[in-house]
Image (cartoon, rainbow, N blue to C red):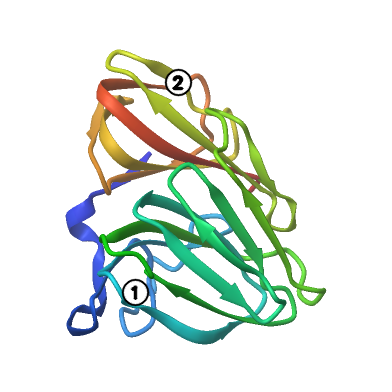
Amino acid sequence: MDVRRAGERYRGGDPQAGIETRHAFSFGPHYDPDNLRFGALIACNEERLAPGAGFGEHPHSHTEIVTWVVEGELTHRDSAGHETRVRPGDVQHLSAAAGVRHEERNDGDVPLTFVQMWLMPRESGGDPSYTLVPGIADATPHAVPAAGATLRVRRLDRGGRTAVPDAALVYVHVVRGEVRLAGEVLRPGDAARITGAEGLEAVAAEPAELLLWEMTA
């Protein structure tokens, strides 16, 4: 298990424009050849947008983009005609496939915080697609078959426990709260990259929310 702390994340974004980003992996000008990906996962960005701030229309291709809103409301528009508001508890999944353009903004009057994760598909090409799962239930899996990955959201009360999937690769991201996992204490923004997970369990020291990616090798 490789634990990466919140303080180790690369700082990005454009603070003067109201955009603050913390990158878990090599990203843009923050190039680290030893931290390019973990399994299919190539980005796990913590984004904070001030009211009125956002990312103007820009292109993506050959990327599975999954977004989890922590606080506030995210406005998404794309070149395929989708315009949605993504709220806490919703899972947004944009499959860029051969190419799509989109924009993401905070059109609300309160700060917006979200986690955005990018996964590399096994095959290139295809048509872009969009899915919004409103208010996903605790532990309900959201499959990203193009990348051989499955996301599970876990919300734990103090003392609550959740099994870590027995899988070739598992990525655990702490959204809020504090958990203990294999002798390590993980807090908001911390992540664990686990290879060959078997019989592991996360225990909440206080109310917590976790994002768990189960991936094939």
Tell me the kind of residue under disc 1: Asp
Label 1 near label 2: C-beta < 8 Å?
Answer: no
Viewer-closest of 45 and 32: 45
Q: Secondary structure at mark 1?
A: loop
Q: Single out the mark in the foreground, 2 or 1.
A: 2
Give the quarter of the image for residue 165: top right
- Which residue occupies 23% across, 38% down? 187
Which numbered circle lies on residue 32?
A: 1
At x 49% / y 27%, what residue is drawn? 164
Quadrant of the image occupied by residue 84:
bottom right
Q: Secondary structure at mark 2?
A: strand
Disc 2: which residue: 162
200 or 126, which lies in front?
126
Residue 137 in the image, given as x and y percentages of width and height: 56, 30
**Left or right, residue 119 beside residue 146:** left
Task: Report x, y in % for residue 157.
Answer: 33, 18
Can residue 216 be spotted in the picture?
yes
Q: Is residue 33 above or below residue 206?
A: below
Identified at 25% across, 43% down, the residue is 188
Q: Residues under labels 2 and 1: Cα distance? A: 32 Å
- Amino acid type, residue under disc 2 in the picture: Thr
Residue 1 percent coordinates (x, y): 38, 39
Q: Residues within 10 Å of mark 1 (few under 14, many from 20)?
A: few
